[in-house]
């Protein structure tokens, strides 16, 4: 949970005015200035986009329907008075037909109201879906990194619940109208009981609203636990194989049980609170209704012709109050669903853009950089396809922890650079800076000599090819996985790309060839085959100016890694290429190597220069040679080669 720390004491205002405060990070500044979402106001705004005529007509129809309900009660009451006057059968039949006609008119009024409320609900759901689909691609990557996948999925799947909001609002308004009209009827029949009737109406309305904040909190608690359960189910499904392999079923069941206990406890708390509020309201309203009737009959000294109607309307007031309370109890669930939807809708789209800027506006400086990024540069009379990258005194923080420090880097357009270092040194974080996962806390990032901000990351991505083992493989056909980011114009290059990524043999093994579904997360592929699919997907980009490779050949043997690295560098010979790898020996073919340690670039030179002296690069290269030539080739190992599904022993390591 979060810890709130509050500091008290005197502050030296004069000293504070002369002290320069460090600038806030973009994320923190956006969080501090973010406005609290207002779900009801947002719903009203979305409904108003269709115009005010339909909602106003709906309110008018509700008023007429509520008045008709009161009129219906008067007609039924009149039957008792005029029944003795209707002596002829034809008169009684006419009265029955008149009553049926009135009920038909009431039904004819109610049906359009219900249909219109349903239509408004469908429109609200559609507009929320459109707004969410429009918003998600514009959110910063760090927004999704701070939220579980299951949580975002739960928000999306809960949109359909918003469909009932207009119907709930309709029922609430209609109940309030009936309550007011019934109150007027009671006051007309028994003016002396007006104060008591008004107290009865106030009790029927106030008690549910007094319980509303507590119900909101308890419902949100229930939904938080339900979200934790959804995340648990998703994690359990994704990790089913390791759970079984590690015999962790007992621990998983125990964790599931603890989550269920928390959810059940929060649900019982919500039910107890709702029942308590209903009980208090019913008790208070029933007591006031009985008191009103008792005083009226004691005051009147007898039973009059309108007393039956007074009893009916007085007892109806608590019933309407109970209906209002039921709607109030449903509101927390709807409010919390809407709040969870409004949270991503109200999140800042681009932290570098002023808060008052329109979402679709592009500032002039950003437009220049977008054009420069998407267009190959001209240098010394020749077209340079690659992208020049420069970082000046760059520092990157994540959760207050420095992951990149004092980075000074200048990579020429079309240059191929290898990046090595121990695990956790910051190699992938450097690529993440270019992909937009991280932002500079201080310093500058320049692309083609132009300063880059958050508004420009999208333009960079359009011309960036990225290969990483974490890239998702979808449960779709091989062809869709290869081509989903490139479009139909790249179909003519499929054969060439499959040859370069060594995918022809894989396709020949698949039962339905290019149309074979690869399973969730590429379950039908081995680790190396999945990597080659990811590589083929990147190679299909015809306009790449920057290639970012993070352990691109994981799961492949040494011969395949060497061959594919040569193929990739030839394919992107004019493209700026950064390759993060733990295979230090393969970096000997690069013109330049960066060695990163503890978030800093400690060495930057050609492999020949770095390997000639006692450097960190030389130490990494020697450690790899020792492991390969002495450890893996040791006599203590028994070696088995698997080829074409057949396992057979081999004499020595490859």
Image (cartoon, rainbow, N blue to C red):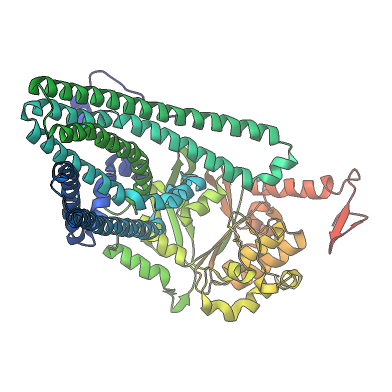
Q: How many marks?
A: 0
Image position, residue 44 (x, y; %): 24, 52
Image position, residue 597 (x, y; %): 57, 43
Residue at point 41% right, 64% down?
459
564 above or below 253? below
For the N terminus, the quadrant is: top left
Q: Nearer the viewer, residue 209 or 100?
A: 100
Q: Nearer the viewer, residue 194 or 442?
A: 194
Residue at point 33% right, 25% down?
279
Residue at point 64% right, 78% down?
496
503 above or below 446? below
Q: Is residue 93 left or right of residue 144?
A: left
Q: Is residue 386 left or right of residue 82?
A: right
Can you name the residue that lies furthest to the bottom here? 492
For the C terminus, the quadrant is: bottom right
186 above or below 241? above
Q: Nearer the viewer, residue 428 or 462?
A: 462
Q: Quadrant of residue 104?
A: bottom left
> In this orientation, does residue 485 appear?
yes
Can you name the residue that lies furthest to the front here? 88
Image position, residue 62 (x, y; %): 20, 51
């Amino acid at each position: 949970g979060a810890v709130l720390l509050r500091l008290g004491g005197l502050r030296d205002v004069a000293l504070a005015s002369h002290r320069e405060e460090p600038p806030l990070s973009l994320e923190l500044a956006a969080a501090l200035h973010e406005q609290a979402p207002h779900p009801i106001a947002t719903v009203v705004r979305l409904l108003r986009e269709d115009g005010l005529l339909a909602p106003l007509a709906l309110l008018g129809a509700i008023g007429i329907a509520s008045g008709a309900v009161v009129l219906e009660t008067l007609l039924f009451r009149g039957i008792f008075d005029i029944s003795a006057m209707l002596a002829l059968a034809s008169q009684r039949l006419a009265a029955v037909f008149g009553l049926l006609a009135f009920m038909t008119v009431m039904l004819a009024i109610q049906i359009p109201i219900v249909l219109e409320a349903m239509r408004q609900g469908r429109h609200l759901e559609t507009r929320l879906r459109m707004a969410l689909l429009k918003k998600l691609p514009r959110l910063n990557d760090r927004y999704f990194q701070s939220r579980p996948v299951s949580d975002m999925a739960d928000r999306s799947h809960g949109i359909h619940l918003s469909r009932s909001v207009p119907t709930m609002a309709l029922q609430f308004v209609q109940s309030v109208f009936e309550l007011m009209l019934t109150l007027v009827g009671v006051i007309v029949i028994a003016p002396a009981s007006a104060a008591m009737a008004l107290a009865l109406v106030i009790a029927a309305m106030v008690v549910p609203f007094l319980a509303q904040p507590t119900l909101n909190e308890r419902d949100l608690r229930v939904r938080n636990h339900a979200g934790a359960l959804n995340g648990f189910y998703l994690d359990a499904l994704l990790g089913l194989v390791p759970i079984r392999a590690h015999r962790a079923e007992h621990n998983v069941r125990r964790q599931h049980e603890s989550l269920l206990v928390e959810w059940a406890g929060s649900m019982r708390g919500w039910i107890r609170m709702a029942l308590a509020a209903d009980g208090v309201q019913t008790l208070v309203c029933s007591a006031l209704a009985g008191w009103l009737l008792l005083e009226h009959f004691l005051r009147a000294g007898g039973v009059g012709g309108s007393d039956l109607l007074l009893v009916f309307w007085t007892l109806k007031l608590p019933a309407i109050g109970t209906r209002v309370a039921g709607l109030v109890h449903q509101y927390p669930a709807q409010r919390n669903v809407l709040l969870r939807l409004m949270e991503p809708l109200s999140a800042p789209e681009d932290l570098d853009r002023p808060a008052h800027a329109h979402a679709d506006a592009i500032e002039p400086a950003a437009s220049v950089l977008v054009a420069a990024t998407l267009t190959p540069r001209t240098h010394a009379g020749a077209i340079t396809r690659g992208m020049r990258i420069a970082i000046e005194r760059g520092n990157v923080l994540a959760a207050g922890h420095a992951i990149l420090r004092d980075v000074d880097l200048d990579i020429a357009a079309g240059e191929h650079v290898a990046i090595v270092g121990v695990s956790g040194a910051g190699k992938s974080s450097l690529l993440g800076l270019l992909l937009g996962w991280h932002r500079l806390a201080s310093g500058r990032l320049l692309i083609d000599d132009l300063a880059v901000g958050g508004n420009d990351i999208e333009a960079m991505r359009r011309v960036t090819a990225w290969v990483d083992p974490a890239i998702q493989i979808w449960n779709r056909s091989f062809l869709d996985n290869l081509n989903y980011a490139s479009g139909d114009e790249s179909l003519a290059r499929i054969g060439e790309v499959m040859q370069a990524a060594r995918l022809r043999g894989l396709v020949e093994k698949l039962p339905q060839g290019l149309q074979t579904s690869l399973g969730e997360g590429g379950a039908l592929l081995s680790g190396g085959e999945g990597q080659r699919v990811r590589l083929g997907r990147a190679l299909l980009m015809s306009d790449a100016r920057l290639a970012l490779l993070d352990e691109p050949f994981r799961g492949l043997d040494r011969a395949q890694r060497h061959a594919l690295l040569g193929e990739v560098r030839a394919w992107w010979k004019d493209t700026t290429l950064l390759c993060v790898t733990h295979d230090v020996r393969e970096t000997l073919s690069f013109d330049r190597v960066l060695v990163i340690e503890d978030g800093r670039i400690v060495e930057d030179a050609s492999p020949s220069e770095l390997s000639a002296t006692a450097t960190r690069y030389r130490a990494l290269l020697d450690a790899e040679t020792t492991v390969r030539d002495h450890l893996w080739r040791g006599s203590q190992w028994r070696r088995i080669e698997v080829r074409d599904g057949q396992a057979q022993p081999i004499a020595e390591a490859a």
